[in-house]
Image: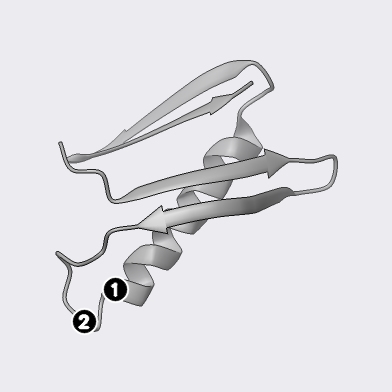
Amino acid sequence: MKLYSLSVLYKGEAKVVLLKAAYDVSSFSFFQRSSVQEFMTFTSQLIVERSSKGTRASVKEQALESSGSDP
């Protein structure tokens, strides 16, 4: 399994804030990299928004899996 993104987000009262993120988009074409990175950021924020505190979420889409934990 390849790790494309690792993100740390804070779930505040109003919105989710991206604190730090690292991406490995080198396996995508040059013209797709920004779109792929934007998609990963959006998806991670969406997972955190929809999960309640103290839970863990895992989303599978075709061959990709995204996981999140909200302590």
In the image, is residue 6 above or below residue 69? Answer: below
Give the residue drawn at x 79%, y 41%.
Answer: 12
Kindly report the distance in space between the C-alpha atoms of the residues bearing marks 1 and 2: 6 Å
Q: Residue furthest right?
A: 13
Whether tag 1 and tag 2 are in contact, CB under 8 A, the answer is yes
The three-letter amino acid code for the residue at tag 2 is Phe
Closer to the camera in the image, 36 or 62: 36
Q: Which disc, if any, is residue 53? A: none
For the view shown, which residue lies furthest in the bottom direction?
31
Q: Split into 4 quadrants, where in the image is the N terminus?
A: top left
Quadrant hosting residue 25: bottom left
Q: Amino acid at mark 1?
A: Arg
Residue at image position (59%, 37%) is: 48
Residue 18 versus residue 14: which sits nearer the camera?
A: 18
Residue at 16%, 76% in the rendered image: 29
Task: Rate crowding at label 1 as few (under 14), some (14 to 19) or many (20 or more) other CA atoms within 10 Å.
Answer: some
Q: Secondary structure at mark 1?
A: helix
Which residue is located at x 58 percent, y 17 percent?
55
Residue 67 in the figure: left or right of residue 27 = right
Percent position (x, y) of residue 39?
Answer: 41, 61
Q: How is the image coloured?
A: one colour
The residue at which mark 2 appears reads as: 30
Which mark, residue 33? 1
